[in-house]
Amino acid sequence: MERLMNTKFRKPLADTQLDYFDTEAAINSISEDAYKHLPYTSKILAEQLVRRCSPETLTDSLKQLIERKRDLDFPWYPARVVCHDILGQTALVDLAGLRDAIAEKGGDPSLVNPVVPTQLIVDHSLAVEAAGFDPEAFDKNRAIEDRRNEDRFHFIEWCKTSFKNVDVIPAGNGIMHQINLEKMSPVVQSRDGIAFPDTCVGTDSHTPHIDALGVIALGVGGLEAETVMLGRPSMMRLPDIVGVKLTGQRQEGITATDIVLALTEFLREQRVVSTYLEFFGDGVPALTIGDRATISNMTPEFGASAGMFYIDEQTIDYLKLTGREPEQVALVENFAKTTGLWADDMSEAQYERVLEFDLSSVCRNMAGPSNPHRRLPTTDLAKRGIATEWKKEQGVMPDGAVIIAAITSCTNTSNPRNVVAAGLVAKKANELGLVRQPWVKTSFAPGSKVARLYLEASDLLPELEKLGFGIVGYACTTCNGMSGALDPKIQQEIIDRDLYSTAVLSGNRNFDGRIHPYAKQAFLASPPLVVAYAIAGTMRFDIEKDTLGHDQNGNPITLKDVWPTDAEIDAIVRDFVKPEQFKQVYIQMFNLGDAEQAPSPLYDWRPTTTYIRRPPYWEGALAGERTMKGMRPLAVLGDNITTDHLSPSNAILATSAAGEYLAKMGLPEEDFNSYATHRGDHLTAQRATFANPKLLNEMCLDNNGKVIQGSLARIEPEGQQVRMWEAIETYMDRKQPLIIVAGADYGQGSSRDWAAKGVRLAGVEAIAAEGFERIHRTNLVGMGVLPLEFKAGTNRKTLGLDGTETYDVLGTPAPLATLTLRINRANGEQIDVPMTCRLDTAEEVHVYSAGGVLQRFAQDFLESYG
């Protein structure tokens, strides 16, 4: 463990053999009684400063927390790194490439290892090729997953045996966030005789799922995760910590999904981007950890960085329920109460801003289309123009056909109440003779094997299977765009009739083009509502009023006839969700054993693969100097550009640039897999840059001056409109430096580092936007791309930018400095625009100046060990 700096605050923890650091004493020695007024987040950040900072810097760092200042950087040392196989594997590919670079410079590659414990869960590789109405779906999907990903899984196995401090949970076991919640997080760590709060970063934006247990966990890109893995602190300033007071109690029949979708709309409106939220109030005690996890999971959809709950009796009950050892459960309660982290000790916490939300105001909700914060009350379907008159014809798909209905995502499947509710809807539907519509591809992909055990014990799994919701895998599936192929006849009918087709899923993302290429729009819903829509078969259906079918007596059946009561749900959860089930699953899963050491610290790269390739970040243009002069715009974009626009993760179509490349490499179309799974090979992955067919590049206009939708760009100075990849290739051949101009909230969505890697490999040196989402901004810095923010009142429209310009950046990058963006118009006019340099800390300037995270580490490593 790290060298402990401030031993005068180290004290014995009562009733244990452990010590702890008395953060309250440290804080109060600076400002009397200040500790009790600190938010929960500040207390945990203060603890790690007391435990890790040198005495010379401790006081100044703690004053930042006490006085709510944000003018000094301080280090954060997460206790763990959690990865899924897409970004986790990509990070390890980078480290394997870094070993090669170190070896070529004469360094010892075996010394390049994660310093911080790193857990990699293979959970993002499974596609739902076989649907839930196929009794062999699980085995078929796993076999396809193994076949398609043989190169990737070979590399991951090598990592397990070559890198120190890396544990791997293989495919078929569940979703990283749910496993983290149910098993991996101890809530309170004990290492080398010291007890301290568990904290982690994860290579997925939904890592705050574990915040429900009072664990600070941030979603980061692979590049930031690599920084933490290699033992470097994540430099930060005191975040904006917002209290969210939950009042009232939810109404009968309202699920945690309904609550979180209402909260998502509310918090987006309150502009909580990049804040740390802390939920408290009279409404919190009745929320189970499953409910809280549903809320914390959607933190990135709020726009926030963290969604914290205090430690309380619900936390302790959950740790017992999930089979944590009694000694660990006792340690959590003892530590929390000793250190002022227990909910009762947070009553005097003070927040700079408090938002109030009444749980009793929540109705049954969906979200969509296209955005998770676009709340859609089910009572408003007709008023919003979603539910309309539609014609039912035998054997013909209706307008608004639901082609995918998926119970998916850790957001909901880690909450037994939501899963049980879906099972009870299925049971009542089956009893009344209702059936799934034949064009609906149904699936159930829980994030943990425990779900099967309690559904089997309660006899609800057969009910779900009868309606087509058999278990297709334990993985992140439809929510991540891994919804698999449609029945060819259904797909052809959609194409021939240009049918408005939709998807309904219990996930957290529904951006256009994400869920399936042929689902024109997608809607988020609770698991029981997903079941109802599989029966309805169309989004034109008014789910609250219309008839799902008729019973044996010809009476109409509506949603209220199949919806379970809270008492029914709670009775099933109480009687059939047991600690023994969690122990049965996780004892076996985490019996990792000792793997045989790899024969070489250097990976033997396979030359013909399209999955794993030695990364290029230390060679070619990336090793050269960025000019920041004469940059041409690759794209001029609007607001709310997501990482799905920047680097989609869904299925690769044969007509795309990546599809053409894979075909050229000899891959059959049925094994093209997803963009996400190919991110270990930069030659495939860079062809995903701006490959989303829903992209609106304002440089590309039709004859009427309207922006054309598609993966398009305009090559300048010729003014030729082409496919995006062709423009990128042209500019790469010309060694033309590029810039991207964008609106507000640039880079929201998933924490994928390829959204930054792709543009950097294309030659983009700067992004000029009205605002950045936190994770993507740090990824840009990690790739050596300069984020520049327009000052208030200035944007691409006020400046009249059309893409014919060239751009220069003047000034020396410094934390939040004002730099000048010089715009050179085609007519010779020059405009100098002041921009905020969004290198927010001195450490980010340090990384950017080196060309990125990996270049910085290579330089520092060789200096240290050379």
Image (spheres, rainbow, N blue to C red):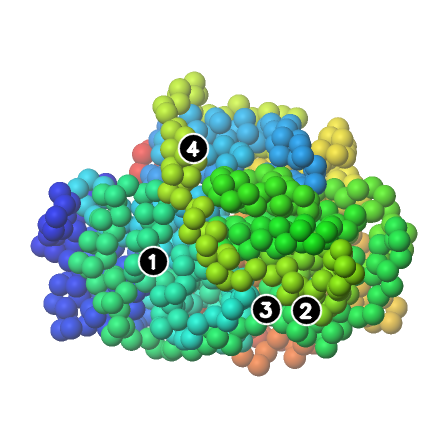
Determine if residue 584 is in view: yes
Indicate which disc residue 589 carries: 4
Q: Which residue is mark 2?
A: 544
Q: Please state which of the two labelled residues, at mark 3 or mark 2, is closer to the viewer.
A: 2
The kind of residue tagged 2 is: Glu
Residue at image location 59% in from the left, 68% down from the top: 364
- Mark 1 secondary-structure assignment: helix
- Mark 2 secondary-structure assignment: loop
- The numbered mark, 4 or 3, whose residue comes first in the sequence reads 3
Tell me the distance, in whole angstroms, between the alpha carbons under discs 4 and 2: 42 Å
Tell me the distance, in whole angstroms, between the alpha carbons under discs 1 and 2: 33 Å
- Left or right? Give the position of 331 relative to 77: left
Residue at image location 19% in from the left, 40% down from the top: 192
Indicate which disc residue 364 carries: 3
Q: Residue furthest bottom?
A: 793
**Mark 3 touches mark 1? (CB < 8 Å):** no
Tell me the distance, in whole angstroms, between the alpha carbons under discs 3 and 2: 9 Å
Indicate which disc residue 314 carries: 1
In which quadrant of the rendered image does the C terminus lie? top left
Picture quadrant of residue 608 = top right
Label 3: few (<14), some (14–19) or many (≥20) C-alpha neighbours in 10 Å:
many
Picture quadrant of residue 858 = top left
- The numbered mark, 4 or 1, whose residue comes first in the sequence reads 1
Camera-side residue of 16 and 268 = 16
| Vertical side of 841 occupied by 651: above or below | above
| Vertical side of 343 occupied by 851: above or below | above
